[in-house]
Image (tube, rainbow, N blue to C red):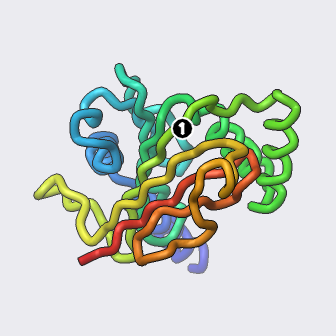
């Protein structure tokens, strides 16, 4: 009797896992909303297959690379970034797949960037993040709802002194530099929600 009971539960768990991952079109439609409107149609998009593995969903024609919401993480978050950040992003994915934690990933990429084995952009490169704890993609309206947009401009090895930026926001939503002096130095701009 136990075996008969376990089989349906196993099947239900498989069905519920698949239900959490939107179809390819839904992932693409949600992911590109983090990009500027004029860049959405030509963006490359990565998403997730039925096993939750990151895969290429659409090859693009412009400089934007977008990533769909990760079904393995809490909340909702999609992002789009300039193609010159791809080596940095790809290396992070590889290190996470190896089981490395955030601090380890930072240290490894810092060492590799300084050694020149990890190519970082030689110009400011932007990442747009559209996220929210209660955000979601509404398939009927085609819109991401209850999300806010954050802008991140990577400028590797920049400092507060080289940019004139503060190391924390001076006003709500104000620009500031995070991780100054490192490969991950970036300007943070988090607009205040109204």
The percent position of residue 50, horizontal first and vertical second, equals 47, 47
The percent position of residue 81, horizontal first and vertical second, equals 47, 40
Vertically, is 178 above or below 186?
A: below
Q: Is residue 97 left or right of residue 133?
A: right
Q: Nearer the viewer, residue 191 or 94?
A: 191
Q: How many marks?
A: 1
- Point 37% across, 58% down: residue: 130
- Point 78% across, 53% down: residue: 106
Q: Nearer the viewer, residue 7 or 117?
A: 117
Label 1, residues with CA under 10 Å away: few <14, some 14-19, many ≥20: some
SS label for mark 1: loop
- Point 51% across, 60% down: residue: 188
Q: Is residue 76 left or right of residue 100?
A: left
Residue 46 visible to the viewer = yes
The percent position of residue 161, horizontal first and vertical second, equals 68, 54
Q: Nearer the viewer, residue 109 or 101?
A: 109
Looking at this view, name the residue that lies furthest to the left: 141
Q: Quadrant of the N terminus?
A: bottom right
Residue 49 visible to the viewer = no
- Point 60% across, 79% down: residue: 2
- Residue occupied by mark 1: 124
Q: Quadrant of residue 136?
A: bottom left
Q: Is residue 17 left or right of residue 53?
A: left
Vertically, is 137 above or below 186?
A: below
């Amino acid at each position: 009797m136990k075996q008969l009971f376990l089989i349906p539960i196993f099947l239900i768990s498989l069905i519920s896992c698949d239900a959490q991952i939107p179809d390819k079109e839904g992932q693409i439609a949600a992911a590109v909303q983090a990009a500027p409107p004029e860049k959405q149609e030509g963006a490359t998009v990565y998403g997730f297959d039925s096993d939750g593995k990151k895969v290429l969903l659409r090859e693009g024609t412009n400089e934007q690379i977008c990533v769909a919401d990760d079904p393995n993480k809490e909340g909702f978050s999609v992002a789009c970034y300039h193609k010159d950040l791809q080596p940095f992003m790809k290396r992070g994915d590889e290190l996470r797949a190896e089981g490395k934690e955030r601090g380890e990933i930072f240290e490894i990429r810092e060492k590799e960037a300084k050694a020149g084995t990890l190519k970082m952009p030689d110009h400011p490169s932007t990442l747009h993040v559209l996220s929210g704890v209660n955000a979601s993609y509404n398939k009927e309206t085609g819109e991401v709802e209850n999300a806010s947009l954050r802008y991140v401009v990577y400028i590797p090895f920049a400092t507060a002194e080289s940019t004139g930026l503060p190391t924390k926001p001076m006003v709500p939503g104000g620009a500031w530099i995070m991780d100054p002096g490192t490969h991950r130095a970036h300007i943070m701009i988090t607009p205040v929600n109204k």
